[in-house]
Amino acid sequence: MIEDLTALGDLPQTLVRRARSAGVYLVWRAQTRAVRRVLVRERRVEETSASSVSGVGLQVFTEDGATALASRDDLLPDATLPLLDGAVRAAHGGRALGVHRAALPDLPPTRAEVVPEECRHFDALSLREAGERLVELEEEWARRSPGPSLRLAYGTDLDAWRVGRSDGTDVLYAMPRCVLRGAATTPSAGARHTVATAISSPHPRLLWDPERTALFLRRAEAAARLCLQLPDAPTHPPGSFPLVIDYALAKGLAHEAFGHASEADAFRSSILAKDGRFRVGDEVGPAHVSIVDETLPGDHAWQPFSPNGLPRRRTTIVSRGRLHEALSDPWSAAESGVAVTGAERAESYRHAPVPRMSNIRIEVEGALPAPGTFEDYGPEQVRELLAHAGVFRRHPRVVYLSGYSGGQVNTASGDFVFNCKALYTLSLDGIALYRPAIFSGSMFGALQSIREAFGPLLLDALGTCGKWGQSVPSSGGSHWFLVLDPHPAVRIGGSA
């Protein structure tokens, strides 16, 4: 599959020469992708699927800043050259539409190849063996967690790109992604609750990795236990309270609120910009809090280069409480008054790349220690952690929001609405479980409220980022737990 990208011969050079003779700047993208899925339910394989796609996308830019994108669902050289001619005509024809034009940036040429070792193992994966192994894992999960209805799914995704530009840039990179997901559902006919969990790895032998599957089963046990407890739990009253959120919910806050609002192509309406320019230096949080986006090797959302052929670099969106850097691409950076960070991503060769996150996290200086592993912490252990740190002297009763199950943010106003998986009240007198509730309010109010953090950074909270009709993998996190002081603009209220 990756060999199809290296076997393009002199097509890249021919495309560049043809674009130069037509007086346009060219970014060409070739992609191959193979996806496999296995679903197991009730100790049997319910579904298997395998799909693959390959194609080429051509994006041309005229000297006066007009652009056009064209694509084909194959890598045939004889068909790609006429595709370029059509893209050139479309770009020149766009002048009559009165669309916004962007100046061509001066980009340094890059030539590189990054293909992780794990990629060579994907062809050897047997869907039949994967299904059998999933059945074994489900049986083990059922033995540990009798009662709920269980579902297991395993997916592998080998996504490879080759990207070039008129300046001689030519980069090849492959992104191996594998995810094991589980969901436990309440068996009762009344109120039904589903609690999901997942782990990822770049290696397709994830299902046979003892350390990773042991971690999955620990998380799966906790999910099954929670789904059985939720039907009897009451609804928590609405209001503003001192909060504890875990790293998964912190990732949702960082991604949905600050991440999307820091994407430079949306600065005409983002609350983090004024008159289309990023508000660099503005105070948005306390001095001990930062928000960082960074692509990490082996991570679910790892991407070493952008679909424009730029190395993706670490971006500190909030540095010690102040806006610092934006997520930008070459065409949005100059207008937004920010540096080019190579933060653009695209779902496929058919799409135009746009700025968006990879692995995003909230970092808190002076985080307090937490012994053991994150999986050691149920609500009782979280309560002990808070008590030992003296949090209950400041707040006799704290609301603990566990897990993240989606949400959205209005990047123009900074208002967010998130859902958690469960809610607990913690105090020296005891613990009470409540049904999932909506976590809502102002992104600035939430960030300003962060008082303490416990544990090291944990950055494996998985998700899918949607924007402009495109979906790409996302990930991130924070320290294991963050403590937020009560704030009038941050509330708990209603059912999730």
Image: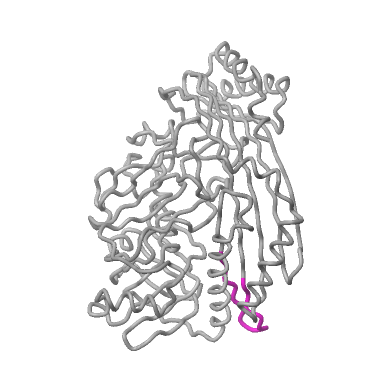
Q: Which residues are magenta?
A: 184-197
Residue at the (29%, 62%) spot, across then down:
367
Query: From what the image shows, is residue 350 above or below residue 131?
Result: above
Residue at the (64%, 84%) spot, across then down:
190
Residue at the (56%, 20%) spot, across then down:
92
Query: From what the image shows, is residue 66 above or below residue 189?
Result: above
Q: Residue furthest front?
A: 210
- Residue 102 at x, y = what percent? 44, 28
239 relative to 465 in the view: left or right: left
- Residue 455 at x, y = what percent? 35, 64
Closer to us: 245 or 494: 245
Residue 341 quadrant: top left
Residue at the (41%, 81%) spot, across then down:
237
In which quadrant of the rendered image does the N terminus lie?
top right
Closer to us: 128 or 436: 128
- Residue 161 at x, y = what percent? 59, 34
Query: From what the image shows, is residue 65 above or below residue 273?
Result: above
